[in-house]
Every structure is written in structure tokens, then in C-alpha cells.
Image (cartoon, helix red, strand yellow):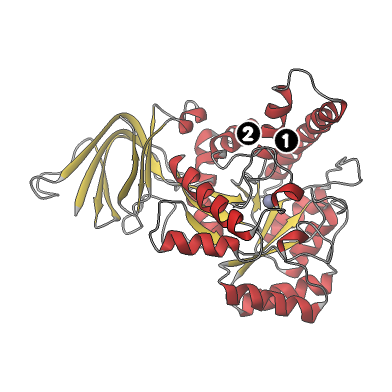
Amino acid sequence: MTTVIHADRLIDGTGAAAIKDAVLVIEAGLIGDVFEGRLPEGRVPEGTETIDLRGCTVLPGLIDTHVHLNMPGDGSMLEVVVRETDGVLVATSTLSARRALDAGITTVRDVGGARRTVFDARRALELGHGPGARILACGQPITITGGHTWYFGGEADGEEGLRIKVREMCKLGADFIKVMASGGGTVNTMSWLPSYSPRELAALVDEAHRQGRKITAHCLCAESTNWVVDAGFDGIEHGGFIVNKAGHQKYEPATADKVARAGIPVTSTLAVGGFTLKAMRAIEHRTPAEQHVLDRWLRMSDENFTQFRRMREAGVTWVAGTDAGWRFTTIEGLPLEFELMQQGGFSALEAITAGTGLAARVLGIEDKVGTLKPGLAADVIAVAGDPLDDLSRLGDIRMVMQGGHIRKRVS
Ligand SMILES: [Zn+2]
């Protein structure tokens, strides 16, 4: 089975400049060759299916490196979502994966859900019971007793307890391991303090790597980041600098330098602030509590942008992740994340690369998806117009192809 796609331009996800008047050949569900201008005579058999995407830009399926499929992203608090049964959470997860795919996000990395619900959702999709984004899952985020997202079932303490928990996640089918190295948005956790000791973090890394898994850590304060880098983690989520209960941040250049020198990628998750501000501004008559949320996020978003820019200048690698599901952050939110990254100093092409080719490298799946290199799975999307001119074009999806199968087509 061969398909030929014609489009105004093609962005291949490697960071290379767009190719104009592109012709993309798909063969047996895999990316074939890319040509500029026109297809060479005799390259494909007579009567090959042709998809005309003139007026559109073709690019690799997008990858969101930080989502929570359990959560609907409609403003619900984690504390409310986790009251539902596991059956509901599995259903919500498959629906989230479906919504992501419809939005051109063909792969997601789920960084934490309840018990085995995300593994079960992943399994149903693998069985072909419906369309959805490819899911990489960690299962339960590993957290101290009473720590961030403890409701998911990931509590474990002490070096031995942590090794057992890592093995348990691998037994259930974890593609990677996620650790809460500081508190977070969970009620009564302390985002301004590290959670695990350096020795516990070292045990986590050792065990994850023995099991052949990458390990990433949620870090909202500088000390948690310092310790995670020393322990040899493969990734950092958020990379915040919170110093107190009010959520004030204080940028630490030495921490940024440390992350940059170690070459550990950090997920951006700027969309959390973007979506919260949007939701709060949309309320005509805000309650004092809502006004407080708005004021807090106005300040936090400002600080987040400044830190994003300064860390980038220090040489930190930012990879695109939204924290979809968390509060108001929708599963379709990656284009907004790209726009916010652009406001933080990225070019449009760099932002797209951070959510395609670079994201695949960070996840260790660059030999399967993420770019339009020959031999990779044909996860290809088309959007109307030129997203390099205007990243919001990525919200105008005209085609979604996953593994060579057309999942969506809008003419
Ligand atoms: Zn998260």
C-alpha cells in the first residue's frame, strides 16, 4: 500500500527548514521519501492513492510529553477526579487519548494516573478497540507517603520500599518511571521543599535503570532539581523555583547551570498558567477565591516566563509538555504550549521541534515516531496555512494519519 501526499510545505520535525511544494511518499504504513516540487517519474506505481493537501502544511504527528489522561482538564480538582471509580478513570483516559488524536497529537506520555487505569486504557487501544494517541505510561507516579498525587496509589518510602515500587510499576507495564521529587498542587503537599532524600533518589535511579527504564522527576523547587540532577535522572518536569507556600519563586542560576551542564531535558508545562488565566478571565463576576487564583497565576506566569527564558539562555533544553488534564489544561493544548514557548523566546520552528523530533528523542522513541524520516511510522498531520507564520494554525487540523491509517480528514 502506497500513498502520496502533496502539500504546500513540509516540516520534518528535525528542526530543518520547511520544504516547499512537498511530496511525501507513505509505504506500508511507514514514511518513504520526501521530494521538493514533484515526484520523480516512476517512483510510485500507476494508480497510487494521492492525497491533495494544497493550502496545507504537513508535519509529524505531535507529541505531548506531559499529560494526565485520567483527568478531564475541565477545571476539576485532582481531589474531585480521584473520587471516581477506576472504571470511570479508564473511560476518561481512552476518551482523552481519542481527543488528543483528533487534535493531531498522535503520541502522549502519561506522567501519572491512578493504580493501573492508564495501562488498561493503553491496552484497549493496542487491541484496536478504538482510535487514540499512542500512550507511553508510567502508571502511578512514585511519591512519599502523603506526597503530591498520593491518591493515585504511588506512595513508597525508603530505599528498599522504592526499589519494590519501581519493580511493581515495571511488572504492571511501565514504559518509564515518574517520581514526585517535590510537593505540588495536591492539597497539603509542599512544592517548595524536596520530598525524597538524595539516597532515596539514587536508589530510584539505580533500580529504574536496572529495569531498562528512563526515570523523570517532578521538581517545583531548586533543591529538588539539584538533588535529581546529582542522582542521575533522565528528565525533569516543570523545573520550578518555588520558595514558599504563597508560591513565590526565586530563580537560582547555579541550578539552571547544573541542569544545562548535565544535559537533562525539562518539560515546559507553560500551558497550565495559560489555560488557568484564560478560564479565570472568562468569569464575569469572580468570587474572592477566583480572584485570588487569577492574581496568583498572573504573578506565577510572569515568573515562569522569566525563568523559562533565563534557563534557555543558560543552555537548558526545553521539551514541549502541557500538563494536560491538570485543572484547566486541555488535552488539545499543545498548540498553546508552542505559542507560550514562542513568547518565551523560541522560534516557531524550535517550538514545533520541541513537540515532535526532540520530544521523541527525550522519550527514547525517535526510531519509531517524531520526524518524517524514511522508515518511521507514518504519523503525519496536516494543518491549514503556515504554522511557522502563526502557531495557532496547528489548531486547524485537516488530516491526522497514524501508522499510515487516516484517522481524521477535513476538506
Ligand atoms: Zn503533571
The percent coordinates of residue 308 (x first, y second) are 71, 40
Q: Amino acid at mark 1?
A: Phe
Q: Return the disc, 1 or 2, that comes first in the chain's sequence.
A: 1
Outermost residue, top direction?
284
Residue 19 visible, this orientation = no
The image shows residue 53, relative to residue 252, as above or below, that is: above
Residue 308 visible, this orientation = yes
Q: Which residue is mark 2?
A: 340
The percent coordinates of residue 230 (x first, y second) are 77, 67
Task: Mark 1 and ligand 1: say if the CB distance to the nearest ligand atom is below 8 Å.
Answer: no
**The one of 118 and 401 positioned closer to us in this rendering:** 118
Q: Residue at x 58, y 32 (%)?
A: 339
Q: Which residue is mark 1?
A: 305
**The one of 19 and 304 positioned closer to us in this rendering:** 304
Image mark count:
2
Picture disc at residue 345: none
Q: Amino acid at mark 2?
A: Leu
- Look at the image and tell me in which quarter the N terminus lies: bottom left
Judge from the rendering whether residue 309 lies leftward or rightward of residue 347; answer left or right. right
The percent coordinates of residue 110 (x first, y second) are 59, 56
Element under disc 1: helix
Element under disc 2: helix
